[in-house]
Image (cartoon, rainbow, N blue to C red):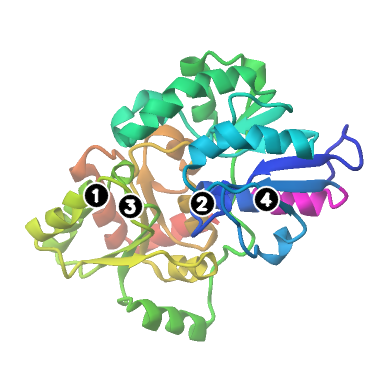
């Protein structure tokens, strides 16, 4: 469906920096959103702004124009000092900034996606440097934006409260798993993934950036209880390392779970459906999420999901997942043990999830 009410040759400018490097989270959101816009509105023009070359993009994004104005030393300073002049020269009809950050001086109207309010409500979940910048300028950007998008009703209500945003200015637009997230049944493909990543026959899966917000320390402690009950399942962690995780490996050693926790690192998006399909249970007991896309991706692939009864995760996953208290290790362990003990419940959740 085409967007109604805009000129046929509308030019859209987008912050392309989330597309740099190995994508997760906001990078996937940006790339998939841009691809959908280009399919729905092929007559529009699309300008991508970034402080470093984006390189060769996937075929569906190849029609976007990469606007060269590079300054790789600091993304934040590039956006504030250099990007406004670039936007002024390219003169888009509208800009979209998908990662909660935009130039304070913006020569064209812009839409801002703010994924959650955790910066204001859960300061300890963010690096200190982020507080020095985002907490100061995000309220200003929210006032100056033509419109604001967030990704869940829970996030919309929190942002409206902490930033004082008028109700009509912010919209909650849920995310969705891409179409290629579906159950993988090809035996050769699954065998290839098992061999490539040295996966055991039975395992619990986590996908996401390894950082404190994901609550992995409590998940590992719950895994210790699972081991005590005689279950052989390994915890397979898929995702790049984040910040403040130095003590995580030490906690694994303290619990003597070195043989039960496997770090896989970054996995290409096209291989994730196979991993979701192989997992006994997908685990995502995050402390806070603006949306939480990995549980939906797991559901689309037929994996039973255990996740938090907090923030947007309860909104998105209620009725199709095992919901646990993320701050209670016993609750996480009880949820895991219930799922592992009841194959019929796992099948039921897999069906509800799909």
Q: Residue 245 carries which label?
A: 1
Q: Quadrant of residue 313?
A: top left
Counting residues from the start of the chain, the first of labels 3 and 1 encountered is 3
Q: Residue 210 carries which label?
A: 3
Nearer the camera: disc 4 or disc 1: 4
Counting residues from the start of the chain, the first of labels 1 and 2 encountered is 1
Q: CA gap, disc 4 to disc 2? A: 36 Å
**Magenta-colored span:** 33-43
Residue marked by disc 4? 68
Secondary structure of residue under mark 4: loop
Q: Which mark is residue 146?
A: none
Residue 37 magenta-highlighted: yes
Dot 4: within a 10 Å radius of its alpha carbon, few (fewer than 14), some, or many (20 or more) residues?
some
Secondary structure of residue under mark 1: loop
Q: CA gap, disc 4 to disc 1? A: 36 Å
Contact between labelled residues 1 and 3, with CB atoms less than 8 Å apart? yes
Counting residues from the start of the chain, the first of labels 3 and 4 encountered is 4
């Amino acid at each position: 469906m085409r967007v109604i009410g805009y000129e046929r040759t509308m030019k859209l400018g987008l912050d392309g920096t989330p597309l740099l490097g190995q994508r997760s989270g906001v990078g996937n959101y940006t790339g998939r959103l841009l691809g959908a816009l280009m399919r729905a509105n092929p007559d529009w023009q699309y300008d991508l702004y970034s402080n470093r070359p984006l390189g060769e993009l996937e075929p569906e994004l190849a029609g976007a124009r990469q606007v060269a104005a590079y300054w790789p030393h600091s993304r934040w300073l590039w956006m504030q000092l250099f990007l406004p002049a670039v936007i002024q020269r390219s003169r888009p009809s509208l800009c979209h900034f998908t990662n909660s950050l935009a130039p304070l001086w913006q020569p064209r109207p812009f839409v801002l996606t703010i994924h959650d309010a955790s910066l204001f409500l859960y300061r300890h979940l963010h690096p200190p440097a982020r507080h020095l910048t985002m907490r100061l300028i995000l309220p200003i950007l929210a006032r100056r934006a033509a419109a604001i998008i967030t990704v869940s009703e829970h996030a919309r209500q929190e942002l409206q409260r902490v930033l004082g945003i008028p109700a009509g200015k912010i919209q909650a637009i849920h995310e969705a798993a891409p179409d290629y997230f579906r159950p993988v049944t090809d035996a050769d493909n699954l065998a290839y993934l098992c061999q490539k990543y040295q996966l055991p026959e039975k395992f619990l899966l986590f996908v996401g950036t390894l950082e404190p917000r994901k609550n992995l320390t409590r998940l590992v402690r719950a895994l210790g209880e699972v081991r005590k009950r005689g279950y052989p399942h390994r915890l397979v962690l898929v995702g790049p390392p984040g910040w403040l995780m130095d003590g995580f490996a030490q906690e694994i050693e303290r619990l003597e779970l070195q043989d039960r926790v496997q770090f896989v690192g970054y996995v290409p998006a096209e291989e994730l459906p196979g991993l979701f399909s192989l997992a006994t249970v997908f685990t995502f007991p995050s402390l806070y999420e603006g949306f939480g896309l990995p549980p939906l991706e797991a559901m689309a692939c037929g994996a039973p999901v255990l996740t938090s009864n907090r923030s947007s995760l309860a909104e998105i996953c209620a009725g199709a997942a095992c919901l646990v208290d993320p701050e209670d290790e016993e609750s996480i362990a009880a949820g895991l043990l219930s799922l592992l003990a009841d194959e019929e419940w796992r099948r039921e959740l897999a069906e509800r999830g799909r």
